[in-house]
């Protein structure tokens, strides 16, 4: 049973790390699920530790949606630019993560140009949208990486003890 849970945790951790880059996969929540399963088997983590990481995970998930829009708005993106960035990112998903970022910037610029912005203004808000997305990816990667570290170290300690 312990080995089966460890294998499932490994799959969740891998999915959690991949989910930092793929918008359809919830990275930090998958990593948190692995940590909770490790706790279920080993009982190693305190309640405060678990509550802290649940709170951090919820905050990062909310920021994941908020940061790209906030940076776009801060640098003058229009509503059409934000919608264009979302549509571009979704279309870019059919290619690669690079296609996703490319679709994001092209969609933001196209949306802002359709809203009557100059090319320079549209490019500025498109780049800001990509910057916000990269900040969001970085935050998710840090949280998932830390959760992965704690989970793996606990399983190593548990199985080698």
Image: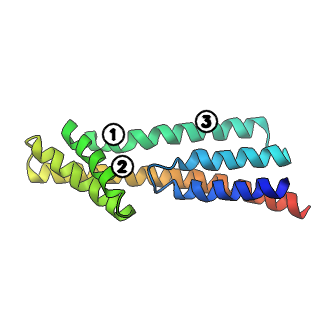
Task: Indicate which disc, 2 or 3, sits on the residue closer to the N terminus.
Answer: 3
Q: Position of residue 101 (x, y in %)?
A: 33, 58
In the image, taking residue 16 as reference, residue 8 lies left or right, namely right
Q: Which mark, by number, is residue 55?
A: 3
Would residue 34 be seen by someone viewing this image from the given angle?
Answer: yes
**Residue contact between numbered discs 2 and 1, judged by CB atoms under 8 Å:** yes
Q: Residue at x 32, y 57 (%)?
A: 92
Q: Nearer the viewer, residue 25 or 77?
A: 25
On the rendered structure, is 94 left or right of 146? left
Q: Earlier in the sequence, mark 2 or mark 1?
A: 1
What is the crowding at mark 3: few (fewer than 14 residues within 10 Å), some, or many (at least 20)?
Answer: few
Residue 134 location (% of width, % of height): 39, 55
What residue does disc 1 label?
70
Secondary structure of the residue carrying tag 1 is helix
For marks 3 and 1, the one nearer the N-term is 3
Q: Name the residue: 82% across, 58% down.
A: 3
Q: Are marks 2 and 3 in contact (CB under 8 Å)?
A: no
| Residue 78 visible, this orientation | no
Quote the CA–CA distance across marks 2 and 3: 21 Å
Q: Secondary structure at mark 3?
A: helix
The residue located at (36%, 56%) in the rendering is 93
The residues tagged by marks 2 and 1 sit, at their Cα atoms, a distance apart of 8 Å
Question: Can you give x and y, in whole percent of width and height, for residue 112 in the image?
Answer: 15, 45
Quadrant where the C terminus lies? bottom right
Judging from the image, what secondary structure is the residue with disc 2 in? helix
- Which disc is residue 107 wearing? none
Return the residue nearer the eye: 19 or 61: 19
Find residue 26 and report its horizontal and vertical position in percent.
53, 47
Residue on which disc 2 sits: 132
Left or right of 2? Residue 93 is: left
Residue drawn at x 59%, y 44% as measured from the top left: 29
């Amino acid at each position: 049973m312990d080995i089966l849970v460890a294998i499932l945790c490994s799959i969740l951790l891998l999915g959690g790390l991949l989910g930092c880059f793929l918008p359809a996969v919830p990275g930090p929540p998958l990593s948190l699920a692995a940590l909770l399963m490790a706790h279920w088997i080993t009982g190693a983590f305190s309640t405060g530790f678990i509550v802290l990481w649940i709170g951090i995970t919820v905050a990062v998930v909310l920021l994941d949606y908020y940061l790209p829009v906030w940076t776009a708005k801060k640098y003058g993106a229009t509503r059409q630019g934000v919608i264009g960035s979302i549509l571009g990112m979704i279309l870019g998903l059919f290619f690669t993560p690079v296609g996703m970022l490319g679709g994001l910037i092209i969609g933001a610029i196209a949306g802002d140009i359709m809203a009557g912005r100059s090319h320079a203004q549209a490019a500025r808000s498109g780049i800001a949208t990509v910057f916000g997305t990269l900040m969001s990816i970085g935050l998710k990667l840090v949280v998932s990486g830390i959760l992965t570290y704690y989970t793996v170290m606990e399983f190593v300690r548990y199985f080698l003890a």
